[in-house]
Amino acid sequence: MGQAMHDLGIERMPLEQRIALVQEIWDTVAVDAGLPSSIPAEFGLLEQRVAEDDASPDDVVPWESIKAEAAKRWRR
């Protein structure tokens, strides 16, 4: 564990607070790096996709199939 985590008591924070802290830190890093910020509509779309996946966990396509299909399309 890093010294800053110990000095700030981060390791003693509840999990949800640590996750929120990481998000806040990442947001400042993204701004400083000039990365585009996420918009609420993107979060809504992600939540919708997670809900769809949760509702149909067996409705998936293996990664190898996706790569093969992409490679086939690329060769055209």
Image (tube, rainbow, N blue to C red):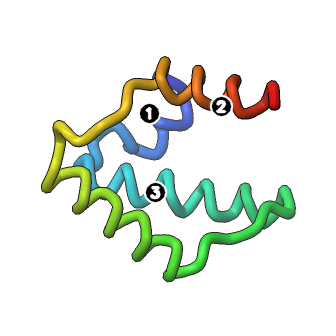
| 22 lies above or below 73 | below
Q: Position of residue 53 (x, y in %)?
A: 25, 51
- Camera-side residue of 5 and 42: 42
- Helix, strand or loop for disc 2: helix
Cα distance between the residues tagged 1 and 2:
46 Å
| Residue most extreme to the bottom | 40
Precedes in sequence: disc 3 or disc 1: 1
Q: Which residue is mark 1?
A: 6
Which mark is nearer the camera, 1 or 2?
Answer: 2
The residue carrying pointer 1 sits among few (fewer than 14), some (14 to 19) or many (20 or more) residues within 10 Å by Cα, namely few
At horizontal 68% and vertical 25% (from top left) the residue drawn is 72
Task: Give the residue displayed 34% in from the left and 61% down from the top.
Answer: 49
Relative height, residue 2 to residue 14 (above, below): above
Residue 26: give x, y in percent of width and height.
61, 55
Which residue matches tag 3? Answer: 21
Return the residue found at the far left.
Answer: 55
**Which residue is disc 2 drawn over?**
70
